Image (cartoon, grey):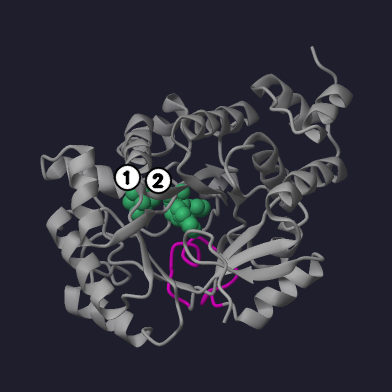
Amino acid sequence: MATLEQITQKVRCGERISGDEALILWLQAPLWLLGELATEAKRKVSGDKVYFNRNFHLEPTNLCVFNCKFCSYRRTKGDPEAWDYTMEQMEQIVRDRAESGATEIHIVGGVHPEHDIYFYAELIRCVKAIMPQAAIKAFTAVELAYMIRKAGLTTEEGLCLLIESGMEAIPGGGAEIFDEELRSKICPEKGTTAEWFEVHDAAHRLGIKTNATILYGHVESLEHRIDHLLRLRDQQDKTGGFNAFIPLKYRNFGNSMSEIGEVSIVEDLKMLAMSRILLDNIPHIKAYWVMYGKQTTELALSFGADDIDGTIEDSTKIYSMAGAADQRPVMTIEQIERIAATAGLRAVERDTFYNEITR
Ligand code: V47
Ligand code: SF4
């Protein structure tokens, strides 16, 4: 079996490591070493840059046909905290932000019991008509698989319909944990791992860039996390369409797994570093500041992250409802620049496809 020194050497030389080697590194490497290895790997991809974008989220509803145990966001119809926007209300939300300079609109929500793929195609067309300059990154693979299946279309047919309407990228949500047994415990009704991969595989083959996530810090083991990362690395070898990987820390407020608590910041930093080291073929590792909070995000930039997501403009409720510190998440460009500078890095504005934007 390889030693920590041998594995460290391999990572330094840019050689791919196996799952067994990753486990040794995760268990034995001190935090500073993981930070150093991940930073070296990050620097090869993005030098001294930290990417961000000007973006906002549109969350059509928090009604959902599923009931994932970790979800703090879902409500049932009639609940005072439920929302279910009409097309007109969503158009108004976008119109209100039309002058914000956003280059991306991230659309995700619950899996609505009634709305079908044609409603969402229309939504994309309406949003695009109001902000043609912004890219639409829309719907998790779980939402997509559900609406496409319900319409009786093949995955390719469903995606093509949405692409023709203006969908340009797909976010990484719905991945949770790929291990089938564990997935069936924490989100038994949700779309399967195979469905998640089918949507991303088809999207990549159609030329659409996507992101990927993991939900970590609940009841999974390190082996489950490594298995998750390796499945993504294999997929990326085949289709190459993942832009970014986003480790999502389980936040425990207001859901039915609350009693298990949350993992430490050290655990978050190790998760980021190991993601950077193992996913040698996914260009960007995103520290989603809305979920970590601004302080942990500063630290994340010394552990392999090269992206912190965007300005957000108080447009998402997923993490504020799950206990994140920022109850009204907004980040100004000055704050983003300060966070990057604290880590000795340079904030660079990007579009959805990581083209740099100079204003
Ligand atoms: O899939 C739900 C997660 C995800 C909780 O692609 C929770 O750029 C932690 O995927 N604690 C949706 N996480 C959000 C998402 C995302 C976010 C930012 C950027 C991108 C991107 C994607 O939120 C869900 C689920 O894994 N989630 N509940 C919770 N209690
Ligand atoms: Fe629905 Fe998503 Fe919440 Fe699961 S995580 S219950 S799919 S909104």
Mark 1 and mark 2 in contact (Cβ < 8 Å)? yes
Front position in the image: 321 or 216:
216
Label 2, residues with CA under 10 Å away: few <14, some 14-19, many ≥20: many
Q: Position of residue 335 (x, y in %)?
A: 67, 79
Left or right placement of residue 151 versus residue 159 in this view = left
**Is residue 323 rendered magenta in the image?**
yes
Quarter of the image with the N terminus is: top right
Residue at 45%, 43% (x, y): give it: 241
> Under 8 Å from ligand 1: the CB of mark 2?
yes
CA gap, disc 2 to disc 1?
6 Å
Q: Is residue 97 above or below residue 166?
A: below
| Image quadrant in which you'd find residue 301 | bottom right
User: What amino acid is found at the position of numbered circle 1 in the picture?
Assistant: Val
Residue matched to label 1: 142
Q: Please give the range of residues in magenta.
A: 314-330
Q: Secondary structure at mark 2?
A: loop
Left or right placement of residue 218 versus residue 38 in this view = left
Q: Position of residue 166 (x, y in %)?
A: 26, 62
**Is residue 324 rendered magenta in the image?**
yes
Residue 120 in sight here: yes
Q: Position of residue 178 (x, y in %)?
A: 46, 32
Tell me, for residue 240, which label it has, or none.
Answer: none
Quarter of the image with the C terminus is: bottom right
Residue at the far top: name it: 1
Q: Earlier in the sequence, mark 2 or mark 1?
A: 1
Q: Is residue 251 above or below residue 327?
A: above
Q: Is residue 150 above or below residue 253?
A: above
Residue matched to label 2: 174
> Under 8 Å from ligand 2: the CB of mark 1?
yes
